[in-house]
Amino acid sequence: MPAIDFHKVGLPGGFVAPQAAVAPATMTAFLEGPAVAANGDVYFSDIINNRILKLDPPTGRFTIFRQPSGRTNGLLFDPQGRLLACEGNEFGPNDGNRRITRTDLRTGQVEVLTDRFEGKRYNAPNDLAACSNGQIFFTDPCYGDRSTMELDHESVYRIDPGGRVTRVITQPQIERPNGIALSPDERTLYVVDSCAVPGGARKIWAFDLSPDGQVSNQRLVFDFAPGRGGDGLCVDRQGHLYVAAGIYRPRGPHETADVPPGIYVLSPDGSLQGRIPVPEDVLTNCTFGGEDLKTLYITAGKTLFTVRTEVPGWVVHRRG
């Protein structure tokens, strides 16, 4: 058989339509914010494509739940099973209005919970946590064009059941709040502080949380510096933290590859239990699902991963 230069192999007419070119029928671009409904469906954000996707785990079928999504990032189901969403992850003419919304899956009704603080638009709502009493906490960093900021701070807010919004954590107490989660007893609030600049924070903080939503007693849980720190996180029923962190390819001196990508499992006191390796950059978030809450869903780059765990997860709409 003669040698073939595969770089010069073409295709004669009669096989492909004239002038036809291969184009993606569908693709994901940058996945974030997985959240699992009570029926097992997995919702997650495809930020750049401006949509929320839905996976039916038994069939493996993906569908578009909403497009445009308002460029959602973090998603979460509240105690009543309604879908909370951080909208406005990217700045520009279609920035999603930088708001927190709540969707009733039964009726499809979308309610805007908040889109301004003290008359000014939020930066880019990123992630959420919800208490069984109806309180919602969300982070509002700025990773984009800072010239579009109306607020002069990056903060964590609480939305009370009646709709009142209170700023509970702000700079310089924290540099750039990202992921957020609650302990199973709802007495501790965890916040990822991820500031991707030279010398910026790569930390996870814990705060005591009172029943009325006040935070106090800030303390360091873990520091990933100088590697890429945490993004999103979730907790299991024993209180361990599962943190999406690390990177394969360094992004300049401000984010090194010292921390390989994976889900880092930490005890509440910050002791590192180990890492679940994930073969893709960039890890963004994770959550528990499945009938027994022992399936961990992980968003990373263009892929939604799953892994089975020994300890069941804790999610507020399936507590018990």
Image (cartoon, grey):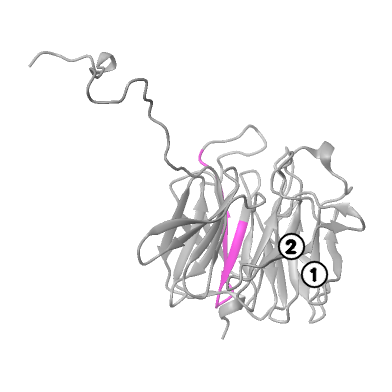
Q: Which residue is mark 2?
A: 138
Question: Circle 1 sits in a helix, a strand or a loop, which is it?
Answer: strand
Q: Residue furthest right?
A: 118
Along the line of sight, the residue nearer the viewer: 14 or 64: 14
- Residue 24: where, in percent of width, then height? 42, 36
Give the residue furthest to the left: 1
Residue at disc 2, secondary structure: strand
Q: Residue at image x 48%, y 70%?
A: 289
Q: Is residue 132 left or right of residue 119?
A: left
Left or right: residue 33 compared with residue 280: right
Q: Position of residue 52 (x, y in %)?
A: 56, 55
**244 within the magenta span:** yes
Which residue lies at the image location 62% right of the left edge and 66% below the top edge? Answer: 76
Please state which of residues 130 and 112 is positioned toward the viewer in this rendering: 112
Task: Give the amino acid at mark 1.
Answer: Ile
The CA span between labels 1 and 2 is 8 Å
In the picture, the disc for residue 159 is 1
Provide the residue span drawn in magenta.
Answer: 232-248
